[in-house]
Image (cartoon, rainbow, N blue to C red):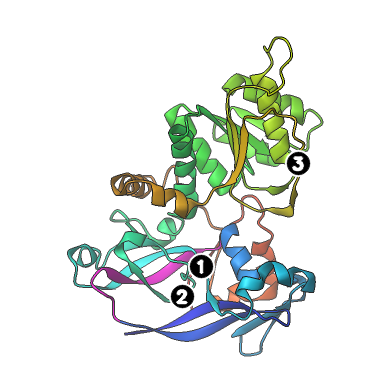
């Protein structure tokens, strides 16, 4: 039995966000489970929507005893999150630390004392109990901080390339391309000879990607963006895109450019557009505005959602383990993550600090150490 301090989130039906620090008890592990003392849990964009929802964080306040953060929620947004109202939920998708207790199975016992990364949805906690299948065992010498971002970004980047191959495409387009994930994707594509079109929104992001060897970079704030995008897609032959933005017309612009390339040599009346399938997967929501589709790209296209865990669920177990091993072997190269700051629970709940990490600025990433004083 382990006592553990843990962060929880709740949005009340009256319209108040409550982030609370609570004492919990971790029961003994079952045969296939391990208990990990979490030393590093990153704050990813994918953590922030479950954590804060549509709260007005400019009005966030921390209680005197530092155990409760509150903020008002825009009332008009409550119907959108109806399914989670008045539910006290754990937070923290991933993290890393040392295995301090293990179930009696051989696989669990083999992890005892080792540094592992975990995917659990409850890593903002001093201790975390997970099945062995939710762990990546890291090589000796890798620290918890180095291993903290082993799942969400590395496996998403690898999953994008795997999806490309499985669906018969030969090149990729990626938005929000200077993110930590985007930089990992570039390193993978460069190493494997995959052509990648990067879409950024400012020059400093383009410079980051140039610095790691990216060849095709299109700045969506540039007057020449649509021409640049067409030229990059023409050179690479990309017919698959992954979009982290969600809102606005960017998805439509990508499909339009793909169609223009695909039908540029068409003769005569071209009613249904090019034959090659053009596919965009939306995997993030940096812009919560509606996705606007100006349908000028024929009839052979698709838009869908892409979620890491559902993608991994489609893969055979040996393939998943192969990807896990690659992450462990390349955690300080391809998948290296630099953190702006390491926060304890009190710091993570401090409104001024919260504003910093919730800004999701390129090049800034924060990690929570639940066991830091």
Dominant secondary structure of the residues highlighted in magenta in the image: strand
Instruction: Tell whether 310 sits left or right of 271.
Output: left
Q: Position of residue 225 (x, y in %)?
A: 75, 30
Q: Which comes before the other along the chain, label 2 or label 3?
A: 2
Element on which disc 3 rests: loop
Q: Residues within 10 Å of mark 2 (few under 14, many from 20)?
A: many
Residue drawn 59% across and 45% down? 304
Q: Nearer the viewer, residue 251 or 324?
A: 251
Instruction: State whether residue 294 is above or below residue 139.
Output: above
Would residue 42 be counted in the magenta stretch?
A: yes
Q: What's drawn in magenta, residue-wise?
A: 28-43
Q: Nearer the viewer, mark 2 or mark 3?
A: 3
Query: In the rendered image of this protein, does residue 245 appear above or below residue 163?
Result: below
Q: Which residue is mark 3?
A: 249
Element type at mark 1: loop
Q: Given this view, does label 1 or label 3 mark the residue nearer the observer?
A: 3
Q: Earlier in the sequence, mark 1 or mark 3?
A: 1
Q: Which residue is mark 1?
A: 92
Separation of residues labelled 1 and 3 (CA atoms): 31 Å
Residue 219 in view: no
Asked if the residue under mark 2 is in contact with the one under mark 1, i.e. CB atoms within 8 Å, the reply is yes
Asked if residue 208 lies left or right of residue 104, the reply is right
Q: In what element is the residue under mark 2?
A: loop
**Residue 82 is at least partly visible in this image:** yes
**Residue indicated by mark 2:** 125
Residue located farthest toward the right when viewing the structure as drawn = 223
Q: CA distance from mark 2 to mark 3?
A: 39 Å
């Amino acid at each position: 039995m382990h006592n553990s301090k843990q962060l929880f989130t709740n949005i009340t039906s009256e319209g108040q966000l409550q982030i609370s620090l609570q004492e919990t008890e971790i029961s003994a592990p079952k045969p296939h489970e391990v208990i990990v003392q979490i030393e590093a849990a990153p704050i990813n964009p994918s953590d922030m929507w479950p954590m804060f929802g549509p709260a007005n964080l400019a009005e966030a306040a921390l209680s005197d005893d530092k155990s409760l953060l509150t903020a008002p929620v825009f009332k008009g947004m409550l119907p959108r999150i109806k399914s989670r109202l008045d539910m006290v939920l754990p937070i923290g998708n991933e993290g890393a630390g040392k295995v301090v207790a293990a179930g009696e199975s051989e696989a669990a016992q083999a992890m005892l004392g080792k540094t592992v990364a975990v995917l659990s949805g409850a890593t903002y906690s001093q201790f975390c109990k997970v099945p062995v299948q939710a762990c990546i065992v890291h090589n000796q010498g890798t620290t918890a901080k180095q291993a903290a971002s082993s799942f969400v970004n590395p496996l998403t980047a690898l999953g994008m390339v795997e999806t490309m191959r499985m669906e018969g495409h030969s090149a990729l387009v990626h938005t929000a391309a200077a993110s930590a994930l985007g930089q990992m994707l570039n390193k993978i594509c460069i190493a494997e000879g995959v052509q990648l079109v990067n879409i950024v929104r400012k020059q400093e992001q383009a410079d980051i990607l140039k610095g790691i060897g990216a060849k095709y970079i299109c700045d969506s704030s540039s007057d020449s963006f649509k021409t640049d995008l067409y030229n990059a897609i023409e050179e690479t032959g990309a017919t698959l895109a992954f979009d982290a933005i969600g809102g606005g017309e960017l998805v439509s612009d990508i499909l339009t450019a793909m169609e223009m390339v695909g039908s540029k040599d068409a003769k005569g009346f071209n009613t249904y557009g090019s034959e090659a399938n053009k596919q965009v997967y939306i995997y993030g929501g940096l812009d919560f505005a509606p996705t606007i589709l100006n349908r000028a790209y024929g009839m052979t296209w698709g838009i869908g959602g892409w979620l890491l865990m559902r993608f991994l669920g489609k893969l055979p177990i040996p393939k998943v383990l192969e990807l896990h091993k690659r992450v462990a072997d390349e955690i300080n190269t391809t998948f290296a993550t630099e953190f702006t700051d390491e926060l304890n629970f009190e710091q993570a709940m401090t409104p001024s600090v919260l504003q910093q990490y919730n800004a999701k600025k390129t090049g800034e990433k924060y990690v929570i150490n639940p066991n830091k004083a």
